[in-house]
Image (tube, rainbow, N blue to C red):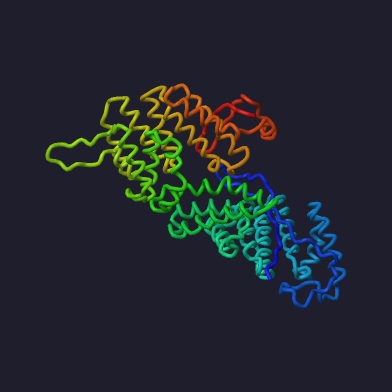
Amino acid sequence: MKKNLFLLFTAITLLALACTPKTTEKTVVKEEPKTETAPPKPDENLSPCPSWNNSPDKDAIIDSYVLCKDEIRAKNYEKAFPLWQKVYAEAPAADGKRNTVYTWGLEIFNDKFNKETDAAKKKAHVDQIMKLYDEMLECYPDDEGYTYGRKGFDLVYNYPDYATDKEKYDLFKKSVDLKGMKTQAFVLNPFTDLLIKQYNSKAISMGEAQKYAGLISKIIDNGMKTAKGNELEGFKVVKGYAPVRLEEFEAEKGFYTCDYYKGKYLYIYEEDKSDCDAMMEAYSILRWGDCSEMDAKLKEINAAYQAKCVEKDPVVVDPGTPVTPSCNDYLRNGQYAQAIQCLEDRYNKTTDLSKKASYAYSIASVLTRQKKFSSAREWANKALNHRPGWGKPSLLIGNMYASSGALCGPGTGWKSQVVLWPAMDMWEKAKKDPESAGKAQKQINKYYQYLPTKEDGFMNGNVKDGDSYKIGCWINRTTRARLK
């Protein structure tokens, strides 16, 4: 019988790199039995490790256990330690039904680790913590999915220098393989981050990355539908981070299917079927996703584009040479590498500043779709330099900033909200161009609700509305605080 020993977690502030995922985990063990001396039932699936059930010192062990529990709850770890040692030595499995002795040991040695300054002694504490995890796996094999996940979590957030990314990734992978759709929320954000890193470093194949990216998405959807209370709150945190990070795989040709792109990006066309830019963008993204030109929706978009939109980059045919695709042909068909090369060639050859601006903006747009934000901003700024006051590049940069909440923070909370401030700067700039004013105002209205409050500002360094504030991460810009 699988032991349901643990509930989910509450939020803790992650003191790590700005672009590192924030996730939360708090161990809450199964309620203590009404009587510590109740004999085990014959059919109970008890731990194979020593418990107090058949110990001649049972009463003394239980007394130490109860006293230790009180000190742990009060976070008096130094007082708890000798009591814990007594129980751990004789009955590490407690009554055979709960792993509290191990989880208390993890708390105690984590406290020692945090207070210690000597590197060798800190490592010794981590070694002891890892030993406790290994013993938990032996004594409570039915909960190994949770234990692997929590061990990985600790190595990511508490002891990042004591294991490689591959070792951490493998722990989370074991957890997900064992728990499946019942994987706890606290596993998903760090696993997502490591999944992307392992793929980018070519440590895992596309097939493996596709498998777990799909599984993470399904686990989140299931958790949002079935979880309750603190567990649901945990999945809400994950929902704000993991799906956005998984979008990075969209830059990999063939990673996601046509159905994925249709489900996610058809709205660009559906929201405004008269907008030529929207038609081009939607069609291009779906073609990048290997959707067939014969797909009914693509045929509809293409027909609307041909009927309404003037071709701005016509094919130029030299006598005696084969017809070659235009830059727009490459863009329309989702051939992004060829499109960028074509546009760069045009950009470098022309002296017309208006055309340079147009080519630079198109390159920025393609790079944005591939989540290459730094390079995309560079090209968008080139477009602005060639055509000052043009709203579309500013609108695009603002959109990049607004979509960076999960890159520069946990997806929710302060670090993810403040990226909206430089986004607002760029949208305000785009509003000065009548061509872009409507779309810029729409973005401002859409994201205003997600701005931090005055209370948030007070809790994060007493930031006041209007203060100058430096945003880090890839944005790296000084902006003006905007607080509700």
Seen in the image, is 214 located left or right of residue 380?
right
Which one is nearer the viewer's eye here, 79 or 431? 431
Q: Count up the numbered dots.
A: 0
Q: Quadrant of the N terminus?
A: bottom right
- The residue shown at (53%, 51%) is 193
Relative image position of residue 25 (x, y in whole percent): 67, 52
Relative image position of residue 277 (x, y in whole percent): 38, 34
Seen in the image, is 84 located left or right of residue 277?
right
- To which quarter of the image does residue 451 belong? top right
Which one is nearer the viewer's eye here, 147 or 246? 246
Which one is nearer the viewer's eye here, 303 or 229? 303
Farthest-out residue, left: 320
Instruction: Tell me if residue 456 comes above or below residue 167 in the rendering.
Output: above
Q: Quadrant of the C terminus?
A: top right
Which one is nearer the viewer's eye here, 360 or 323? 323
Relative image position of residue 38 (x, y in whole percent): 84, 71
Relative image position of residue 147 (x, y in whole percent): 65, 62
